[in-house]
Amino acid sequence: MTAVVVVATIRPRPEYRAEVIAAMAKTIAAVHASDGGCLLYALHEGDGRLVMVEKWASAAALAEHGRGPALAELNQALAGRTEGDIDVQVLRPHPAGTPEQGAL
């Protein structure tokens, strides 16, 4: 099976930034502890946005995560605290170059 990479961009409303980050941190801990197909689930920050970079062992593992309680709780915690919808990009690796440097 091919790993699946997800990049999700969240734009928190400035007044809720700390709350959004706290909710994300709680979710990250839960996913790391309970989602068996999770290979990477890491939060990054840019100007006015938060970016989750994820790597899943398979599409089935990602689908299970999508139905899980951690994501449901996160969606509830983020309601009304973000500017617009979360932009979720589900990607398939296209390795090039060396195995270590050419794919997540």
Image (tube, rainbow, N blue to C red):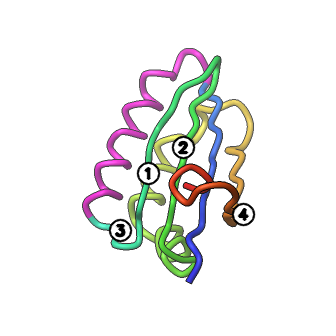
* Residue indicated by mark 4: 94
Q: Looking at the image, do the residues carrying marks 2 and 1 touch, with CB atoms under 8 Å apart?
A: yes
Q: CA distance from mark 2 to mark 3?
A: 16 Å
- x, y percent for residue 13: 62, 22
Q: Earlier in the sequence, mark 2 or mark 4?
A: 2
Q: Earlier in the sequence, mark 4 or mark 1?
A: 1
- x, y percent for residue 21: 43, 30
- x, y percent for residue 80: 61, 35
Q: Looking at the image, do the residues carrying marks 3 and 4 touch, with CB atoms under 8 Å apart?
A: no
Q: Earlier in the sequence, mark 2 or mark 3?
A: 3
Q: CA distance from mark 3 to mark 4?
A: 24 Å
Q: Which residues are magenta?
A: 13-33
- x, y percent for residue 41: 44, 51
Viewer-nearest of discs 2 and 4: 4
Task: Kindly identify the residue that appears in the image at 51 percent across and 32 percent down.
Answer: 44
* Residue indicated by mark 1: 41
Is the stretch drawn in magenta largely helix, strand or loop? Answer: helix
Asked whether, in this view, residue 91 is left or right of residue 57, the answer is: right
Amino acid type indicated by mark 4: His
Amino acid type indicated by mark 2: Met
Say if the magenta span includes residue 53.
no
Front residue of 3 and 69: 3
Q: CA distance from mark 2 to mark 4?
A: 20 Å
Q: CA distance from mark 2 to mark 1?
A: 7 Å
Q: Earlier in the sequence, mark 2 or mark 1?
A: 1
Q: Looking at the image, do the residues carrying marks 2 and 4 touch, with CB atoms under 8 Å apart?
A: no
On residue 35, which mark appears? 3
On residue 52, which mark appears? 2
